[in-house]
Image: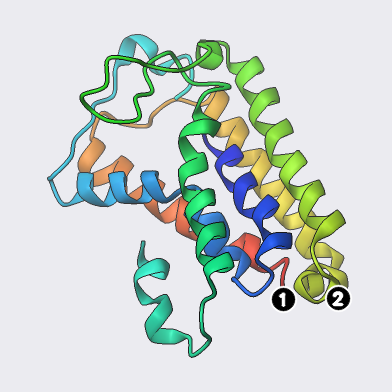
Amino acid sequence: MWIAHFASGLIAKPFAPGVPLSLLCLAGCLPDVVFFTLNFLGVESFRVDNSIAKKGGAILAATYTLTTDRKVTLRDQLAIIIASTSHFLLEWPTHRADVKITPSSTTAFGTGIFDFPFATFITETLIFLLGLWFYTSFSPLATRGGYKRNQNWLWAVLGVFVLQQAHFSFGSAPTNEARWVHAPAFLGEIVASAWLIGKLEG
């Protein structure tokens, strides 16, 4: 539900080496990016439920064609689409059984371990580490230049992402103000995380 969403971009990188890693990782979070943007604009909403808060709590995509003169292949497009649609698959391991593919769907998915912060932390971290291992093992060397030149980028990404997941799993929402606090804060964290993970590439 948090750092595991970046794993799909890491896993997609060997299959789409020409697509920036930050864009692939942002694609895995795209439904959240859209949701938090719509929430901030007042189109969508959510509320903090204090009874469960104690238990855990698109800009790049829109400007990509304007800032890049590279032709995007069908394979690259498929990698981005698969990373985006994987979002719902990656919700299943830790989310409550309330994940619906469409708003009108009567079927909801989720294992329910979200109510167990330690299990959520371990599951999310393992999924992220699997994605990171896949990226560092199978991506072309040219797409790993950032951390190959400076190992500190790899350790920085690992540390920041594990801390984010710890905060997500064990922390609580700082306020009940979803629109003006949570939406921009979470959106900023997603975009900044995608930028940071892109530093692995160079």
Q: Are marks 1 and 2 in contact (CB under 8 Å)?
A: yes
Q: Is residue 67 above or below residue 86?
A: below
Helix, strand or loop for disc 2: helix
Q: Is residue 112 above or below residue 158?
A: above
- Residue drawn at the location 38% of the way across and 51% of the way down: 187
Tag 2: amino acid? Arg
Q: Position of residue 8 (x, y in %)?
A: 61, 47
Helix, strand or loop for disc 1: loop
User: Residue lying farthest bottom?
Assistant: 69
Left or right, 53 with respect to 132, comes to: left
User: Residue lying farthest left?
Assistant: 42
Q: Is residue 145 above or below residue 191?
A: below
Q: Position of residue 121 (x, y in %)?
A: 64, 25
Classify 10 Å Cα crowding around label 2: few (below 14), some (14-19), many (20 and above). Answer: few
Residue on which the image places disc 1: 202
Which quadrant does the C terminus fall into? bottom right
| In the foreground, 53 or 129 | 129
- Residue drawn at the location 65% of the way across and 55% of the way down: 12
Tag 1: amino acid? Gly
Classify 10 Å Cα crowding around label 1: few (below 14), some (14-19), many (20 and above). Answer: some
Q: Position of residue 25 (x, y in %)?
A: 56, 55
Q: Is residue 42 above or below residue 69?
A: above
Q: Position of residue 128 (x, y in %)?
A: 69, 40
- Residue drawn at the location 65% of the way across and 16% of the way down: 119
Numbered tag placed on residue 149 in the rendering: 2
| In the foreground, 21 or 18 | 18
Using the rendered view, name the quadrant where residue 67 is placed. bottom left
Using the rendered view, name the quadrant where residue 197 is placed. bottom right
Left or right, 48 with respect to 123, comes to: left
